[in-house]
Amino acid sequence: QVQLVESGGGLVQAGGSLRLSCEASGSIFSINTMGWYRQAPGEQRELVATLNSGGRTNYADSVKGRFTISRDNAKNTVYLQMNSLKPEDTAVYYCNADVRTTNYYAVNYWGKGTLVTVSS
């Protein structure tokens, strides 16, 4: 089994910054893409940013220039640095990872989410 545990969410004023972390643990052989998604109340879950093992990033247009995704492969951890936060960034942020397990299965995992609230 593999677990993804997010941390770093909270309440911040508009214009502020937060840094989210997500650590993967368990029966991991390797991890390809890690990323962040978010879901606002009454909305569908949407992509925020992804980063593959080769270093290629993908960002939602709404966060380009404000958010930066990075990872520490030795720690199986992905980060999301969020700057210039806006009230519309308020959502539950979910970590996602494409994992090759130790028995060589390719499985996609989700974390339980961390709430980010941006006040105006």
Image: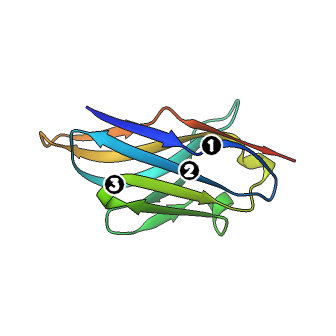
The x, y position of residue 27, in whole percent, is 21, 39
State the residue at coordinates (59%, 42%): 38
Task: Tell me how far mark 2 sits from mark 3, CA to CA.
Answer: 15 Å
Quick one: label 1, few (<14), some, or many (20+) residues within 10 Å? Answer: some
Left or right: 18, with 56 as reference point? right
Q: Give the labeled residue for mark 1.
A: 9
Task: Tell me how far mark 1 sits from mark 3, CA to CA.
Answer: 20 Å
Left or right: 22, with 73 as reference point? right
Q: Is residue 52 above or below residue 43?
A: below
State the residue at coordinates (32%, 68%): 54
Q: Could you tell me the amino acid type at mark 1?
A: Gly
The x, y position of residue 92, in whole percent, is 62, 37
Task: Tell me how far mark 2 sits from mark 1, CA to CA.
Answer: 6 Å
Q: Could you tell me the amino acid type at mark 3?
A: Lys
* Pick the front one: 111 or 33: 111
Left or right: 23, with 17 as reference point? left
Tag 3, which secondary structure? Answer: helix
Farthest residue to the right: give it. 120
* Pick the front one: 30 or 60: 30
The x, y position of residue 106, in whole percent, is 22, 43
* Pick the front one: 8 or 66: 8
Q: Give the labeled residue for mark 2.
A: 20
On the rendered image, what quadrant is the N terminus found in? top left
Q: Are marks 2 and 1 in contact (CB under 8 Å)?
A: yes
